[in-house]
Amino acid sequence: MGLTRTSLRGDTLAVDFEVEPNDSPGTAQVASLPFVVQADIDRNDLGTFNSAIFWNQDNSDQEAQDWYTFTLDSQTAVAIHLDFSGSPTLTDLDVYLFNSTANTNIDYSVADNAGTGVYTETLSTTLDAGTYVLGVQAFITTERVTYSLSIQ
Ligand SMILES: [Ca+2]
Ligand SMILES: [Ca+2]
């Protein structure tokens, strides 16, 4: 949608913008792989409860606020990378990967970003053909923050 990201080799990849509302698995933004999206999130945004999602005293709702979905035609090695560098020091976002109905948590990345000072989350996994949903949780935010999510 008008933006591209260029690697040192000169490869380019289109960058999409987040389309809200994407607050639930049912309204997840469709990601066509390879996919890169620019988005924003705040812990007070509407989200969807899932018991697999971690909670803390700042965010006791076990919700993911932004949801994405993608479909694989065949078994694929998938790399998911969330980057929210430049966010305030206390910011902690996490990602959770589910099956198509979000009743099974396949994997998650929940680094203590404020503790490490590294504001990324990464998941690498090989998935069978099928449809998946990915939830991004604002575990701790002190203000609305922007992130880039790539799925490829
Ligand atoms: Ca959002
Ligand atoms: Ca995190």
Image: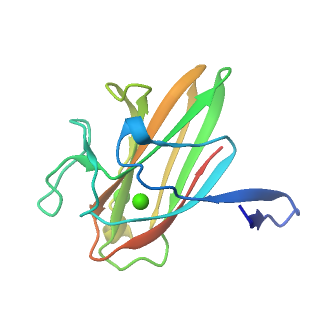
Q: In this view, does 46 lie to the left or right of 73?
A: left
Nearest the viewer among 93 and 47 is 47
Residue name at image x 29 percent, y 70 percent: 141
Nearest the viewer among 38 and 27 is 27
Nearest the viewer among 90 and 13 is 13
Q: Is residue 108 above or below residue 140?
A: above
Whole-percent x and y of residue 144?
Answer: 35, 73
Number of marks: 0
- How was this image coloured? rainbow
Q: Quadrant of ligand 2?
A: bottom left
Whole-percent x and y of residue 47?
Answer: 28, 50
Can residue 60 be seen here?
A: yes
Nearest the viewer among 87 and 4 is 4
- Position of the N terminus, as image quadrant, is bottom right
Residue name at image x 31 percent, y 25 percent: 103
Q: In this view, does 123 lie to the left or right of 129?
A: left
Can residue 118 be seen here?
A: no
Residue 97 occupies quadrant: top left
Whole-percent x and y of residue 121?
Answer: 46, 55
- Position of the C terminus, as image quadrant, is top right
Residue name at image x 47 percent, y 79 percent: 86
Whole-percent x and y of residue 4?
Answer: 76, 64
Residue name at image x 85 percent, y 58 percent: 11
Q: In this view, does 117 lie above or below 56?
A: below
